[in-house]
Image (cartoon, helix red, strand yellow):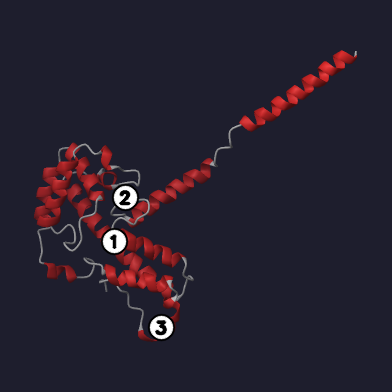
């Protein structure tokens, strides 16, 4: 009886120990699928709203214009909503977004003119997961991007063309419509003089925007609010 009881106790102990080990080996609970889905949807919405020039750069620091826009967004997040500084930053953020949307709209217009009415939006969508390594014909795409930059007015001549359009051109090359796109772009948007880029919507004053961000992050923007309220709320972009 004693030996049987000892065996029972030992079995219980072993079972208990094994249970503890099994508990330790249990995988961590997966994240809430709904939360993950909502986060991905928000990320995709942010990408389409900001149209990052370097979509594959999660830090948004490789290109100057991306760095300025990201800094403006970060500064606004730290500024009291409804304040003069918040409104001023919002104006500059929307100015940069509008400029990027104008470029995208030009590309969409050309694609639709080529007959891609239903496919234009998907062809122009570039996610943060896009990679140059997956491009099928990177050299030809880069050459075409350079031609579009120098021989059309699709982009501002003051800045290098956004890399996101390199990935889009690679798609057009794969579909064998890149040359047709180039011909339409030259026809619809011929090159213009640099002086014409002073028109609203075609240029953003990045150095002045950077100065505004730095002032806001250092708290100087709040000190100047009373003065700005009396003198108007002008923004530092080249848009009116």
Which residue is denoted by mark 3 in the rendering?
A: 229
Screen quadrant of the C terminus = bottom left
Disc 3 to disc 2: CB gap under 8 Å: no
Front residue (pair 185, 43): 43
Which residue is denoted by mark 2 in the rendering?
A: 55
Earlier-in-chain disc, 1 versus 3: 1
Q: Nearer the viewer, mark 1 or mark 3?
A: 1
**Residue 175: where, in percent of width, then height?**
18, 37
**Dot 3 lies on which element?**
helix
Classify residue 49 as left or right of residue 167: right
The answer to whether one can see residue 117 in this image is: no
**Residue 180: where, in percent of width, then height?**
11, 44
Disc 1 to disc 2: CB gap under 8 Å: no
Q: Quadrant of residue 224?
A: bottom left
Q: CA distance from mark 1 to mark 2?
A: 12 Å
Classify residue 132 as left or right of residue 176: right
Q: Residue at x 33, y 69 (%)?
A: 210
Q: How many marks?
A: 3
- The answer to whether 20 is drawn above or below residue 80 in the figure is above
**Residue 113: where, in percent of width, then height?**
16, 48
**Dot 1 lies on which element?**
helix
Earlier-in-chain disc, 3 versus 2: 2
Q: Residue at x 43, y 84 (%)?
A: 226
């Amino acid at each position: 009886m004693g030996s049987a009881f000892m065996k029972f106790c030992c079995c219980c102990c072993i079972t208990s120990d094994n249970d503890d080990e099994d508990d330790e080996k249990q995988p961590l609970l997966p994240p809430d699928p709904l939360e993950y889905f909502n986060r991905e949807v928000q990320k995709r919405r942010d990408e389409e709203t900001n149209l990052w020039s370097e979509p594959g750069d999660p830090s948004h620091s490789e290109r100057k214009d991306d760095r300025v826009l990201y800094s403006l967004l970060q500064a606004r997040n730290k500024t009291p909503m409804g304040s003069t500084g918040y409104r001023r930053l919002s104006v500059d953020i929307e100015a940069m977004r509008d400029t990027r949307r104008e470029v995208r709209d030009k590309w969409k217009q050309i694609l639709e003119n080529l007959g891609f009415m239903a496919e234009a939006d998907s062809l122009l969508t570039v996610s943060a997961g896009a990679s140059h390594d997956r491009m099928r014909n990177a050299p030809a795409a880069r050459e075409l991007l350079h031609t579009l930059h120098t021989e059309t007015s699709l982009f501002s001549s003051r800045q290098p063309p956004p890399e996101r359009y390199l990935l889009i051109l690679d798609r057009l090359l794969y579909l064998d419509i890149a040359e047709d796109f180039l011909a339409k772009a030259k026809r619809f948007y011929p090159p213009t003089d640099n002086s014409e880029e002073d028109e609203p919507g075609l240029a953003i004053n990045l150095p002045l925007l950077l100065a505004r961000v730095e002032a806001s992050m250092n708290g100087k923007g709040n000190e100047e609010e009373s003065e700005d309220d009396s003198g108007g709320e002008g923004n530092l972009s080249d848009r009116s």
